């Protein structure tokens, strides 16, 4: 039984396709295809929302899009003030894409039917590290844009020049902390999810699915919120504008 459960867990990441170029074999895992599938679902969903908003006749999709936008704007303005509106596209894309990636793991039991790309890409540390690096690069790029290169470098010496090494280490730790937090929570959820389906099969553990839905949403929210907090600390928009809504 123990070996069987271990095999179930190890099925999370597996090669699905191979490409041979000049004698070298390149493998593509189910995580790669899960990323592509998540991207497709994310694009189709928000393309549908955008198309509905542009239509003359309002419908449920258009109202859904407006509600989501207002919620996102309120969320960002609470930390960055009104000038935070310029960051809505990036933060919204980051949150939405991570949400789709996290929730794709809800359908991981379909791997028993051969659909191995139904797995959350967030169970791969390289994926979460890439998302964290993208978010932190966005923060630093805006820091340089708003403070100028001299002001950006100067913030590493605040409040005293002796703080320089500590401030540098802090910035290095941020993407590592973000990626490990997201990876650990989603991977742990994946393990519990797979073991539950294995032990209770063929019954559907609805409670675990609800918890997984909640966890995936919360983790995408926390990840995005921390990026906003780091951005607020870097450029100080919240202090300048206040939390006007």
Image (spheres, helix red, strand yellow):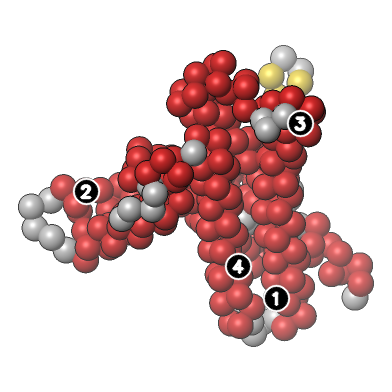
Along the polypeptide, which appears first: circle 1 or circle 2? 2
* Residue ID for mark 2: 51
* Residue ID for mark 3: 163
* Residue ID for mark 1: 197
Judged by depth in the image, the label closer to the viewer, 2 or 3, is 3
The image shows residue 128 at horizontal and vertical percentages of 66, 45
Judged by depth in the image, the label closer to the viewer, 1 or 2, is 2
Judged by depth in the image, the label closer to the viewer, 4 or 2, is 4
The CA distance from mark 3 to mark 4 is: 36 Å
Image height check: is 213 above or below 20?
below
The image shows residue 11 at horizontal and vertical percentages of 76, 57
Residue at horizontal 39%, vertical 49%? 242
Q: Is residue 244 left or right of residue 27?
A: left
Judged by depth in the image, the label closer to the viewer, 3 or 1, is 3
Judged by depth in the image, the label closer to the viewer, 3 or 4, is 3
Kind of element beneath mark 2: helix
Kind of element beneath mark 1: helix
Along the polypeptide, which appears first: circle 4 or circle 1? 1
Residue at horizontal 49%, vertical 29%? 142
- Front-most of residues 21 and 194: 194
Q: Residues within 10 Å of mark 1 (few under 14, many from 20)?
A: some
* Residue ID for mark 4: 215
**Which image quadrant: the C terminus?**
bottom left
The CA distance from mark 3 to mark 1 is: 50 Å
Along the polypeptide, which appears first: circle 3 or circle 1? 3
Residue at horizontal 55%, vertical 21%? 151
Image height check: is 158 above or below 221?
above
């Amino acid at each position: 039984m123990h070996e069987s459960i271990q095999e179930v867990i190890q099925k999370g990441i597996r090669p699905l396709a191979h490409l041979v170029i000049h004698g070298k074999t390149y493998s593509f895992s189910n995580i790669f295809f899960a990323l592509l599938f998540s991207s497709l679902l994310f694009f189709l969903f928000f393309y549908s929302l955008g198309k509905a908003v542009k239509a003359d006749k309002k419908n449920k999709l258009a109202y859904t899009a407006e509600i989501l936008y207002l919620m996102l704007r309120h969320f960002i303005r609470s930390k960055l003030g009104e000038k935070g509106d310029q960051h809505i596209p990036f933060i919204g894309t980051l949150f939405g894409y991570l949400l789709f990636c996290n929730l794709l793991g809800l359908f991981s039991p379909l791997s028993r039917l051969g659909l191995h790309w139904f797995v959350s890409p967030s169970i791969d540390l390289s994926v979460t590290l890439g998302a964290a690096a993208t978010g932190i690069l966005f923060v630093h790029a805006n820091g340089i844009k708003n403070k100028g290169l001299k002001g950006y470098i100067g913030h590493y010496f605040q409040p005293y020049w002796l703080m320089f090494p500590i401030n540098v280490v802090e910035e290095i730790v941020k993407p590592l902390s973000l990626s490990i937090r997201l990876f650990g929570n989603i991977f742990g959820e994946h393990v519990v999810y797979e073991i539950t389906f294995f032990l209770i099969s063929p019954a559907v553990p609805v409670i675990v699915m609800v918890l997984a839905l909640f966890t995936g949403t919360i983790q995408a929210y926390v990840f995005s919120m921390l990026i906003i907090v780091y951005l607020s600390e870097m450029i100080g928009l919240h202090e300048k504008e206040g939390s006007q809504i």
